[in-house]
Image (cartoon, rainbow, N blue to C red):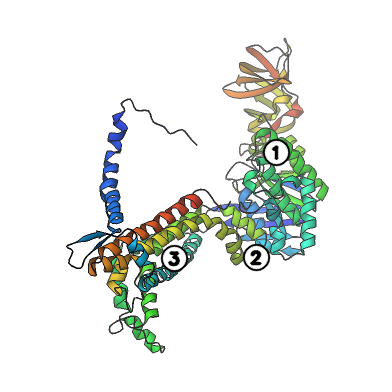
Amino acid sequence: MQNKRAIFGAKGLPYLLLAPQLIITAIFFLWPAGQAIWQSFLREDAFGIKTTFVALENYRYLFHDPSYLNSLKVTVVFALSTAALSMGAALILALAVDRMLRSARLYSTLLIWPYAVAPAIAGVLWWFMFNPTIGILPYLLEAVGYKWNHALDRGNAMTLVVIASAWKQISYNFLFFVAGLQAIPGSLREAAAIDGAGPVRRFWTITLPLLSPTTFFLLVVTIVYTMFDTFGVIDAITEGGPAQSTNILVYKVYQDGFVGLNLGSSAAQSVVLMGIVILLTVIQFRFVERRVNY
Amino acid sequence: MATLTLESLGKTYDSGASAVRDVNINVADGEFLVLVGPSGCGKSTLLRMIAGLETVTDGTIRIGDRVVNKLEPAERDIAMVFQNYALYPHMSVRENLSYGLRNRRMAKAEINRRVDEAAKILEIGDFLERKPRALSGGQRQRVAMGRAIVREPSVFLFDEPLSNLDAKLRVSMRGEIRSLQKRLGTTSVYVTHDQLEAMTLADRLVVLRAGKVEQIGTPLEVYQRPASTFVAEFIGSPAMNLLDGVMQGHALSIAGASLTLPHSHQGPVRVGVRAEDLRAAPAGTTGGLPVHLRYVEELGSQRLGHFDCAGERLIAAFPSGQALSDEMALMAPPEALHLFGADGMRLA
């Protein structure tokens, strides 16, 4: 490692320079996080008059609650499907750009646009397209004999939120995949071509293994995205329904806390979510930063 | 084992720029051909056309009796060593060597036999299980060679394979490539911009300039009878001296000196003379080329005098210990002079 240590004369100056960042972190992250942890140990009565310290009771209750366990399961299915769809599509688009010589720039710029769309708007957009009454896609699906109704069918609802969430994340994944592909020297692919590997075999044996650091990084980032940033999509399209089938963890925190006003349980759920993020971040730092495939 | 024939080969890009023009070369079976030229002369493009990595827009490429213009690189029965080695970084050395054979669904036992044999020839047996990043530059170079050898192709193609090595290693790898090629007897085409590498490796060398063949010949032929001033300046170190002169019949006058030559010509000429063909004119002789000494380079075995001669630079090689003075005269035997016309082409 390079020695990047700067030298300051006065003792207070480094702290002064760090202060804005530290203050923001303290006010907007550490304090609310502390509040959430403290809240998760409390239980309020129905009228909000009395608050009791119940220690881990909220957590114990949570992990025996079928609706919470269902939400965990829904989140896993949602996160993995969204990651698979958005990364798969992004990789295919990136491979297409990598082969393009001329209009690659224009094409890339167009593909980045969905990233600038707010999640709620993305949700509404897809909600309109898939609306069973006025949407174009259910109309087309009906022509091939499929009755689409995400307000009634659990599978339809999950499919729709996955599509809407993945659509937004494709742009981001696409950019990283393009950069990853361009970092692979052309001579490697040429050498493989001379070594008798066709395009498909080249992809599986050369391109994909060399992309693995990018892929792993994007997997973690996309999972974090699906767990936290998709609130707007869910809220705009399904509000967690039908029958809890799209009620992911972060949406349930909101529902139980702000709609159901069960603040103790909601806080406990936030703390669990926080634990998951910390775990994902640790995985990312330990493996992505250090363990590169080659 | 095969011959390689290039017939009026050309490459024009969509933009209209032409990289290679009307190249005709016959490479004999087992011959080591070197393509040499300054950067941008089309030598790499030519090699990549042979490999099938660039499309051919004119002419034909034949390997053995097969026209390979339209064949995929894999179908041409060639192996290529890249400038940056292009080793697969996520595979061990053994996997790197066997990749091309596995792609061709060769039997396991045969793959192992070939890999072990190549490893023995190249002395890389000790690190077959390592990844390329754990190897030194020279070792990577050997692995890249090994990947070509195990395929047992008709033609080896080398794209400046030594340019990433340090000077000392380059000289020893040069020798190894040469002896390996002799041993295997595989037809080879080698691209380099280094004229010394070209001279030492080649059975025949091809000097390219702006996409066209300037001269083809054995290293000695090219050195002794350069076809143009371009070749004269490119091949040989130090570069051949070129001076302006005028010929009237057999009489040549340059920079105030005059000489009688065996061949005749009328008009202005460029006169080339190698540094080692020049020597100091003994005191009192006339007809020498008057020069002014600028500085001396000591090489140990010899000393190079850098001179001014009527406004042009001139380099002469002397045995070490030879005394040089600021103002002196130089001589060269008439048969050591190369005459080029105003267009730069050789007259005689």
Q: Secondary structure at mark 3?
A: helix
Sort mark 2 into few (<14), some (14-19) or many (20+) by Cα contacts within 10 Å. Answer: few
Q: Can you identify the residue that label 1 sits on?
A: B197
Query: Residue flagged by tag 2: what amino acid is it?
Result: Lys
Residue A199 lies left or right of residue B300; in this view the side is left
In percent of the image, x 42 and y 62: which residue is there?
A: A223
* Marks 3 & 1 on one chain: no
- Labelled disc at residue A83: 3
Give the chain letter at badge 1. B
Quick check: can you spot residue B15?
no
Numbered-mark total: 3
* Marks 2 & 3 on one chain: no
Q: Quadrant of residue A245?
A: bottom left
Sort mark 1 into few (<14), some (14-19) or many (20+) by Cα contacts within 10 Å. Answer: many
In percent of the image, x 66 and y 65: which residue is there?
A: B71
User: Which of the two residues, B195 or B345, is positioned nearer the viewer here?
Assistant: B195
Residue A221 lies left or right of residue B77; in this view the side is left
Give the chain letter at badge 3. A
Query: Residue flagged by tag 3: what amino acid is it?
Result: Ala
Residue B167 lies left or right of residue A104; in this view the side is right
Q: Secondary structure at mark 2?
A: loop
Query: Residue flagged by tag 1: what amino acid is it?
Result: Glu
Q: What x and y, as percent, mark residue B223?
A: 73, 36
Distance, label 2 to label 3, CA atoms, is 41 Å
User: Which of the two residues, B306 or A4, is positioned nearer the viewer here?
Assistant: A4
Task: From the image, state whether disc 3 or disc 1 is nearer to you.
Answer: 3
Q: Can you identify the residue that label 2 sits on?
A: B70
Determine whether B275 is above or below A124 in the image: above
Q: What x and y, as percent, mark residue A274?
A: 36, 57
Q: Secondary structure at mark 1?
A: helix
Determine whether A222 is above or below B186 in the image: below
